[in-house]
């Protein structure tokens, strides 16, 4: 297994020091696996997609415009 060094905020470190019963490396490992699984799923979706980057940009623009319109109505 490979070792990894992480920088964490001081306030998180304080919480971790108060809970020495927790195997923090295992918590981090599980969180990273979950994130990696999501990335793998996205990679698989993209690999099978026939969409071009221009298509994705167009859909992105349409969705963002709709969200903007929705929230402007609420004002």
Image (cartoon, rainbow, N blue to C red):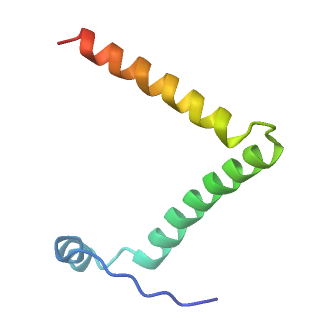
Q: Position of residue 74 (x, y in %)?
A: 22, 11
Q: Position of residue 67 (x, y in %)?
A: 39, 21
Q: Position of residue 72 (x, y in %)?
A: 25, 15
The C terminus, quarter of image: top left
Left or right of 35 on screen, residue 66: left
Left or right of 2 on screen, residue 17: left
Q: Nearer the viewer, residue 50 or 40?
A: 50
Q: Which of 74 and 16 is in front in this view?
A: 74
Q: Where is residue 59 in the image (x, y as percent from the top left)?
A: 58, 28
Quarter of the image for residue 9 reads: bottom left
Quarter of the image for residue 11 reads: bottom left
Q: Taking the image as drawn, is residue 50 in sight?
A: yes
Q: Residue at x 75, y 36 (%)?
A: 51
Q: Is residue 7 above or below residue 53?
A: below
Q: Which of 25 and 23 is in front in this view?
A: 25
Quarter of the image for residue 8 reads: bottom left
């Amino acid at each position: 297994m490979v070792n990894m060094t992480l920088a964490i905020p001081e306030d998180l470190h304080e919480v971790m020091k108060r809970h020495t019963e927790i195997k923090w490396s295992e918590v981090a490992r599980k969180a990273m696996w979950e994130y990696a699984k999501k990335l793998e799923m996205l990679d698989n979706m993209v690999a099978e997609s026939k969409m071009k980057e221009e298509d994705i940009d167009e859909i992105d623009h349409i969705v963002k415009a709709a969200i903007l319109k929705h929230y402007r109505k609420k004002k």
